Image: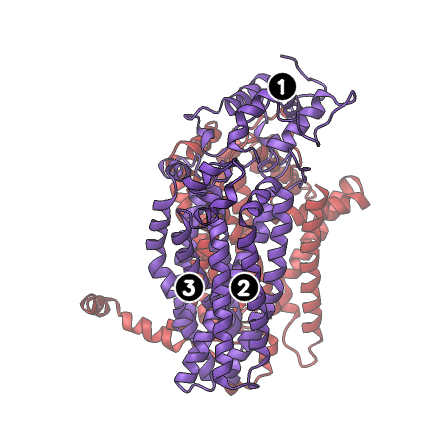
Amino acid sequence: MNYPIWEVHGIGLPWVVGIIAIFHVMISQFAVGGGLYLAVAERKAMKEGRKDWFPLLERHSKFFLILTGVYGTVSGVGIWFAIGLIQPEATSTLIYNFVFGWAIEWVFFLVELTSAIVYYYTWNRIPQALHLKVGWLYAAASVCTLVIINGILSFMLTPGATWLGAAGTGHESSYFWNAFFNPTYWPSLALRSLVCVSLAGVWALVSFSRLDVDEFGASRTQLIRWSTTWLAPAFILMPFMFVWYAAMVPASNKHLLELGMASIGSGSFTQVTRIALMSVMSTATIAGVAYLFAYKYPRDFSPSHATAILVLALAATGSTEYAREAIRKPFVIGSHMYSNSVRVRDVAHLNQVGYLTDSMWAPSGLDATQLDRGRAMFRGECMSCHTVDGYRSMRHFLEGRDFKSIGNILKMLHDYKPDSTYHNFMPPLVGTDEEILALQNYLLTLNATNAPGSVAHR
Amino acid sequence: MAKIYDYLDERLSLSDLKKFGEKKTVPNHKQSFWYYWGGISLLCFLIQLMTGVLLIIYYKPGPDAYNSVRALTYDVDFGWLIRSAHSWAATIFLVSVFVHMFSVYFMKAYRKPREFGWWSGMVLLILGLLFGFSGYLLPMDQLSFVATKVGLAIPENIPLIGHGIANLMRGGMEVSDVTVQRFFAWHAVVLPLLYIPLLVFHLWLVQKHGNAIPPSEEDVPVLERKNIPFFPNFLMKDLAMWLVTLNVIALFASIFPQDIGKVADPLGPAPVGIHPEWYFMSSFETLKLIGKVIPGTIGEAVGITVFTLGLVLWVLIPFYDVKSLAGLRAKRATYFGLLCLGVLIVTTILGYVTV
């Protein structure tokens, strides 16, 4: 508890990042795939003498520049703000390890943004061949940003044995490349690249569907049909890449998915599995819908059809990102830091000296009551995933539970036995007996059936 | 494949059907998007029909209602999915029916010769709402019990006959096992028997008169209007929309599966923040607002009368808005539609805010 806790009621802390991230991924991966799309499309138009494509590509590059240059960058900064407030410990670890990684990424960002602006504003102003080179420069810079950020994102799931061996020694950053090229780096890069290419196709469909059929006729139809083919590599290769990715994910992380598959019939412990399956279903639906709407009848393809595909793409992106985040549980950085910001190596120490003892944010002094300390425990150890009344509502979970029953759950989380089901998705509860009793009493007050003031003593 | 087609064609004249589909056209313009909503409603109805049959296999109306739904949700393999799909399909069904109704209204598709399409649609909407109301009680948990009790207060307020109607629906003075039995009979037998033939009639009328074009398209000369063949162009797009809808239902059913609360207790307190389902929220809130201005039984009677009058005007709009040269009535009808839509949205939001 080195940092203050930010309370978000209703949607809770995870969804603050979740909402920003899902929309950001939709745009930022378009920024990567879309750059490639523009360069390839321009090259094709030059090579095949399709001059009628240029005005349409110019319009598309304007749409691309505004969407990625404005929303993409703003939401990217939004993620920084959000994770800094929600998971300060984990963000601090990432910065400590990857500060040069991010520095390199920002260099590519600058090249990316500059070349995107130059690319749009130099249509018909510089020789076509030079214009295409600017397009390739943008595409290369944007691919490099993915190459960098993928190392950091995949590190959070699988830091790798070498880095984990050095964690806590103060020499973690010496193992930058081990952490960067971690076990899931390559399959993750392959999967994300496929998504980038298919999102380039989806957004191009959105962009070209807005053009008037009578004005742009044949070229509009050709580009809509050609954009649909950009979705094909993802749909053909994605299952293989996914199998590769799953093979590289540690067994402990897959346990929750496997548990979900095993109990899918009864529906218990299946939230992650259900959402992962939704990702597969949405992706397959996009293929069917894009074929029926855009490829078969490109002339009739309208903005509402494109919006339908975009919504499905959002569902697919959202469910994939959710599943990816969820299989990391109970960690925020695999096998190193739990989702409540407690480092694995600190558990025994915190159990002995207390979770609140060294915290500058814990209530202290004569005025601090047991309930204040219980609330501080709740804020520190539970609120990174739970809320009082909203998402994963603690009041709802505790409904009908008495003091003893709450104590049993807390004991189970504190003992954290490997065969406990909660071991797969919840971090351990750390702290001394007094602190856990304080939390137990605080949680009792959240239960509507327990009158305020019914604080019990062990 | 060709041989199978030939075999079927010789016996069922499939090629005639194909030719008919190719000859039939659907207008293609900027507002074509609204044509899909009738199809979406139809898909949702079919999903409810299929999932409903699967639910009936395990559901036990009467005293065992709650336990059977509980077992269905937690013990029967994929019971949770079927129940959730049934419930979410119902929600999306009513959303699409409302969108369909308002799009038909603003496209003036109730005018001659489509009046019966409008009237049959209105009856289908009312039956759809009754499907929702009768299905809501069937799990017989505390929430559905209290919500039904509150919901039956609406017909109870109808002057003179209200009390009798409410008692007939309840099977007594209070909501009980008998009510569940009756609601199940309505939900699974009576309403489908009324709904399906009427739906066939409605679809036949759509096929007979074709899709109406919005007033903005009427100004375009006939030769310049764009049309696409129903088969395969529009049908493929309709199927794509069905795929999207199916995906949305699966998404909601997977992420927000239907839970079941505590068993209904007639003496127990109402759950905190209880409110009617969203599709009844507007009428509930309107009655509440009128009740604040005119308290007591008179207020309730006035509320019901205002509501009934609005509904009657809505149903009878084809008699008022006949196409005239001045177009004054058409404008007034559009304003009336906007007013109704506004009231519906505002009172629904207000209902949720003030719960």
Chain B rendered in what hue? red
Residue, x 36% and y 45% (percent of image)? A248
Residue, x 53% and y 75% (percent of image)? A60
Task: Give residue A25's position: percent from left, percent from top.
Answer: 53, 57
Type of the residue with mark 3: Val
Q: SS class of the residue under badge 1?
A: helix
Residue A375, placed above or below residue A79: above
Q: Is residue B1 left or right of residue B313?
A: left
Type of the residue with mark 2: Phe
Q: SS class of the residue under badge 3?
A: helix
**Mark 1 and mark 2: Cα distance apart in space:** 51 Å
The one of A439 and B108 positioned closer to us in this rendering: A439
Type of the residue with mark 1: Leu
Which residue bears the numbered disc 1? A437
Q: Which is in the foreground here, disc 1 or disc 3? A: 1
Q: Are marks 1 and 2 on the same chain?
A: yes
Which residue bears the numbered disc 2? A108
Chain A rendered in what hue? purple
**Mark 3 and mark 2: Cα distance apart in space:** 35 Å
Task: Give residue B91's position: percent from left, percent from top.
Answer: 53, 49
Residue, x 61% and y 77% (percent of image)? B216
